[in-house]
Amino acid sequence: MLMAQRSAPAKAVEAWTSGGVLPVKTMRSGICFAFVILLLPVRGLADVLPRTDCINNLRHLAGAKEALALEDKLKPGDPVQPDMLKGYLYGGKLPKCLAGGVYTIGPIGVDPVCSVAGHSEAALRRDMERQARNERILVWLLVVFGSAVAAWAALAIRAARKHRNVAADPSLHV
């Protein structure tokens, strides 16, 4: 008598449906996949704190420049020295970039800038848009992959049931 050859998915589903456990290799690969999916959004967070802190410092410097311009009746283009802003900043000190950048105050009407690339409002906004796009792609991949896994499981269950029927009924043997 010839027995129908069972596929690995059929064996896994049969073990699972009969109260057994999934093979270790299958469980390990599923855990690894879940771990990777959970870590994808985290990979870009390494430089977030220094950059957001720096951008907040630039906002404080811009606000101090505006207050100085209003109080001293300065016009756009008038130069601003760092010492002029100390009275308008918390603790009377100029803030420092956590990434080691140097702030350029600039004249009235020009936003302060940091020497570190990417430490600006425009760069932050661009990166946030990129992250949102990547997250949308990830969701679609999960939907598609989840559908594929569901189809695979359905086929494996069908194969396991077919195998049980073949084993139970000798007339179905080839």
Image (tube, rainbow, N blue to C red):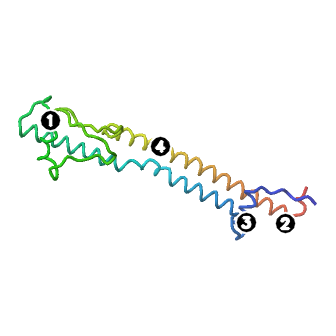
Q: CA distance from mark 4 to mark 1?
A: 41 Å
Farthest residue toward the left? Answer: 72
Q: Secondary structure at mark 1?
A: loop
Near mark 2 (Cα within 10 A), the count class, few <14, some 14-19 or many ≥20, is few
Residue drawn at the location 71% of the way across and 59% of the way down: 157
Q: Which mark is residue 134?
A: 4
Mark with earlier residue (1, 2): 1
Sequence order check: which comes first, mark 4 or mark 1? 1
Within 10 Å of disc 4 (Cα), the crowding (few <14, some 14-19, many 20+) is some
Residue at 42 percent across and 49 percent down: it is 46
**Number of the label disc, if any, that sits on residue 168:** 2
What distance separates the C-alpha of mark 3 from that of mark 4? 37 Å
Q: Nearer the viewer, mark 1 or mark 2?
A: 1
- Secondary structure of the residue carrying tag 2 is helix
User: Who comes first in sequence, dot 3 or dot 4?
Assistant: 3
Q: Residue at x 32, y 47 (%)?
A: 52
Camera-near label (2 vs 3) is 3
Q: Amino acid at mark 3?
A: Ala
Q: For this rendering, which residue is in front, 173 or 13? A: 13
Image x and y of residue 144, in percent: 58, 47
Q: Please name the residue that numbered disc 3 is placed on.
A: 15
Give the left or right position of residue 44, taking residue 26 as reference: left
**Callout 1: few (<14), some (14-19), or many (20+) C-alpha neighbours within 10 Å?**
some
- The residue identified by callout 1 is 80
Disc 3 crowd rating (10 Å Cα; few below 14, some 14-19, many 20+) is some
Q: What separation in Å lies between label 2 and label 4 (alpha carbons)?
A: 50 Å
Task: Give the Cα distance between marks 1 and 2.
Answer: 90 Å
Q: Nearer the viewer, mark 3 or mark 1?
A: 1
Q: Amino acid at mark 1?
A: Val
